Image (tube, rainbow, N blue to C red):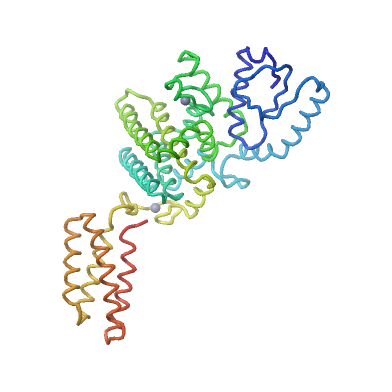
Amino acid sequence: MLISQHYASKLWTNHERKAAQARALLTDAEYVLPIRLDKTEIPGLLPTTMCLYWPPETSETIAEAVRKKLSQLVGITPQGKQTDREGAGSKKSDKPTIRSFQISLEKTYGTANKDLSIDYVYGYLCRTVGYLSKSVSKRNAVEKDFIRPISWLVTFASQVGSDLQDSFISRYSGRCPSCVQAPCVCFKTDKKPPNEMPAYQVNEELYMSRNMIMNSKATVDFDYAKRCIGSVFPNNEIIWHHAGPGFHFSKLAEEAAEVHEAVSGLVTGRKNVKAVSDELADVLAWILGAWYIVLPRKSVDQEIVNYYFNGCPVCQRKQCRCKPYSRRPQNLFDSSVISDLGQRLNQLLALSPISKEEIEELSKSVLAVIETQGDPLARLLISQLESKLSRLKDRYMGTHEAETCVPLISIMLNEIQKVYYQ
Ligand SMILES: [Zn+2]
Ligand SMILES: [Zn+2]
């Protein structure tokens, strides 16, 4: 950037500056080298940004500095170029782009998802978003809690014929889609651009930023998108640290609701795919925004590669053959495990001469849980089974029945861990 009083006043140079700054936020490498011709203040240019002054620099010394910078870039660009040219999932880079991940999910789940309705997929999106919210508020969120809703979001995009990577870049091209600034200043401007910019121009600006990213050699993967959200919306992290994740997750729930509204519009012909795509991009933005805060050191792309290393993580096949609604239970008890426990209790009753009454009581409780399917009741049963069976196990130690009863109780204590899949 050749900075002068004219630079500050011209439309194009300002556009160039904003694009360069947006891009600089997304890269770890030095990206902007400002050359100052006078002392004009440039908005958004931090005093800590290294720059050259001309004078005392001369055209020769600046040319030499640029030449040096470019030769340093040789070490950086080839990698970016290769991943771009060879496409995602190439041998050079196993980390997926958003698009290549969408394609690979289509391959893994294409057959299994073929007959699923939009509402089915939407249901799972909401379910996994809800459980993400729960694990974050309990402060025990791990990578898979994020990867599940991201995966359903990607599946949803495929179902409506939307390209999530393009949706994201079109909406979050390194700036906030509402105020068109980076970082976002919506809290000051009530979600409007600060300079009364007409709506059509907002659209043009965002479109130009999108093209800038598309034409650059940047690999648009989930980590890129995550960095973009983190740097454009630093206030989200401040709010989170002061007031907890509640605000963040109420926004995420709101965006998930808007996905349903947009898709209803799509079905009835009042909205187009672009409208749905925008909402999907918003959901992705809030999920990645949460990842950025909760797991700052974890790479989304790497964790996705690990999660899907063996194909479908449920059936462990490269082409999933899971039946609809067969996904693992996560928050409600697994009835089949409870039934198994009931059967083992009856076995124990047949073997055991002691504590018959206690075992009968537990057996009755198992029946009550199976009949009512009540989750609080199941949690109560589990804790009673755990404590009573452990005591029973101690009582059998050293008796004649130890050999038969103790292993059976050990199996039951093990099974109890499976009632709630984590
Ligand atoms: Zn904003
Ligand atoms: Zn499967």
Quarter of the rendering containing residue 93: top right
Give the residue at the far bottom of this rendering.
Answer: 400
Q: Is residue 420 above or below residue 55?
A: below
Left or right of 16? Residue 337 is left
Residue 248: x %, y % from top left: 40, 37
Q: Nearer the viewer, residue 326 or 213?
A: 213
Q: Residue at x 74, y 32 (%)?
A: 70
Quarter of the rendering containing residue 161: top left
Q: Residue at x 44, y 50 (%)?
A: 142
Q: Nearer the viewer, residue 182 or 158?
A: 182
Q: Is residue 200 above or below residue 231?
A: above
Residue 366: x %, y % from top left: 20, 64
Q: Residue at x 76, y 22 (%)?
A: 53
Q: Is residue 27 above or below residue 188?
A: below
Left or right of 329? Residue 307 is right
Quarter of the rendering containing residue 405: bottom left
Q: Residue at x 50, y 53 (%)?
A: 309
Give the residue at the far front of this rendering.
Answer: 242
Left or right of 414? Residue 164 is right
Left or right of 411? Residue 91 is right
Q: Nearer the viewer, residue 166 or 372?
A: 372
Residue 310: x %, y % from top left: 48, 55
Classify the position of the N terminus by image quarter. top right
- Count how many numbered circles sit on residues in the image: 0
Residue 234: x %, y % from top left: 50, 33
Classify the position of the C terminus by image quarter. bottom left
